[in-house]
Image: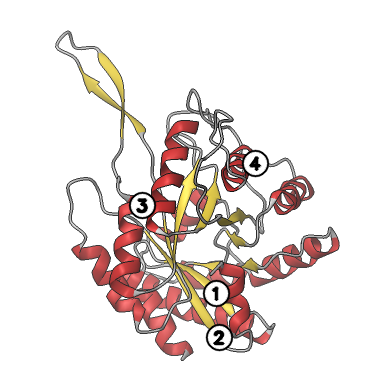
Amino acid sequence: MSITEILNIDKETRHFSFEVLPPLKGNGTEALFRTIDKLAEFNPLFINITTHHSEYVYREREDGLLERHRVRRRPGTIAIAAAIRQRYNIPVIPHIICSGATRETIEYELLDLQFLGISNLLLLRGDKAKEDARFTPTPGGYEHTTELIEQVNRFNDGFFVDGSPIKHPGNKFSYGVACYPEKHEEAPNLDHDLMWLKHKQELGASYAVTQLFYDNQKYYDFVAKARQLGITIPIIPGIKPFAKLSQLTIVPKTFHCDIPQELAALAARCQTDEDARQLGIEWTTRQVKDLYAHGINNVHFYTVSAVDSVHEVAKRLL
């Protein structure tokens, strides 16, 4: 069942979904499963599993010079998705990204997912390398999400990336994309960003999940503008509560989102991590209640470093 079909089953009931991060290489799944155990009681509509492809690290050689190597710190997204679905019987949506991946790598990911019967995806470009000024595609990979979408579409039509036919095509993939109520950091303006979202819809994206935000009015304005431009797919709001004092300054910088003046004033009073955590819970609860009041019944939570806070918010919303 596609995500849009899931969203349409019970439009009047309030639901949420959440995103999890695969464990670091060498770590087990215990902590991840504790996260899901904690949130599964609220009957989430689906679980997103992030993907982190290879990144560069620098290692010192015997001659003292530094040498750049690519490593994958969080492998196993597809295996994690399969394990979650089997253990919890909750729909899973693995991320498929351009960053660090070749066309062939992506093709094998699609084949593995098809063999596993996982047909819902979130297609993303992914982040640029930390040391790069701008996103640089992997040789043999893609620079834009639209190129990734086109590969998935060709796969759905029964063709491999080299153009050869798939002898026994399986079930087709359904996919969503990301969107940015305060525009993507690299977009010159919001209109330009929305133009690309509309193009992704035209290519076949069936829903979008927003980058996190703390000012609901920015989300409402974004959705209204999207609708005016002919973007009709569901736009699911993405929310993340503050959980630590440091996040009050790091999160806006990292995710390029504004802090409303009221929240900024409240944040200035926080003296400890617990103060910040409680503020995050209170503000997020208010945010979601306001979304409910505006007829938004499906909310997506980003849980990294905020699992306990998301759990508390969900309890308060029941």
Kind of residue at badge 3: Ile
For mark 3, give the secondary structure.
Answer: helix
Q: Residue furthest left?
A: 62
For mark 4, give the secondary structure.
Answer: helix
Mark 2 and mark 4: Cα distance apart in space: 31 Å
> Pointer 2: residues within 10 angstroms few (<14), some, or many (20+)?
some
Horizontal arrangement in the rendering, residue 239 relative to residue 91 (left or right): right
Mark 3 and mark 1: Cα distance apart in space: 24 Å
Horizontal arrangement in the rendering, residue 297 relative to residue 254 (left or right): right
Kind of residue at badge 4: Thr
Mark 4 and mark 3: Cα distance apart in space: 22 Å
Where is residue 14? Give x, y as percent.
Answer: 55, 85
Proximity of marks 3 and 1: CB atoms separated by less than 8 Å: no
Question: Is tag 2's residue or tag 4's residue first in the polypeptide sequence?
Answer: 2
Residue closer to the observer: 241 or 55: 55
Residue closer to the observer: 46 or 271: 46
Q: Which residue is mark 2?
A: 14
Q: Which residue is mark 3?
A: 78
> Pointer 3: residues within 10 angstroms few (<14), some, or many (20+)?
many
Question: Is tag 2's residue or tag 1's residue first in the polypeptide sequence?
Answer: 2
Mark yes or no: residue 241 visible. no
Kind of residue at badge 1: Val
> Pointer 4: residues within 10 angstroms few (<14), some, or many (20+)?
many
> Pointer 1: residues within 10 angstroms few (<14), some, or many (20+)?
many
Q: Residue furthest front?
A: 167
Mark yes or no: residue 267 visible. yes
Mark 3 and mark 2: Cα distance apart in space: 28 Å
Numbered disc in front, either 2 or 4? 4
Q: Which residue is mark 1?
A: 299
Where is residue 244? Give x, y as percent.
Answer: 35, 64
Q: Which residue is mark 4?
A: 146
Question: Is tag 4's residue or tag 1's residue first in the polypeptide sequence?
Answer: 4
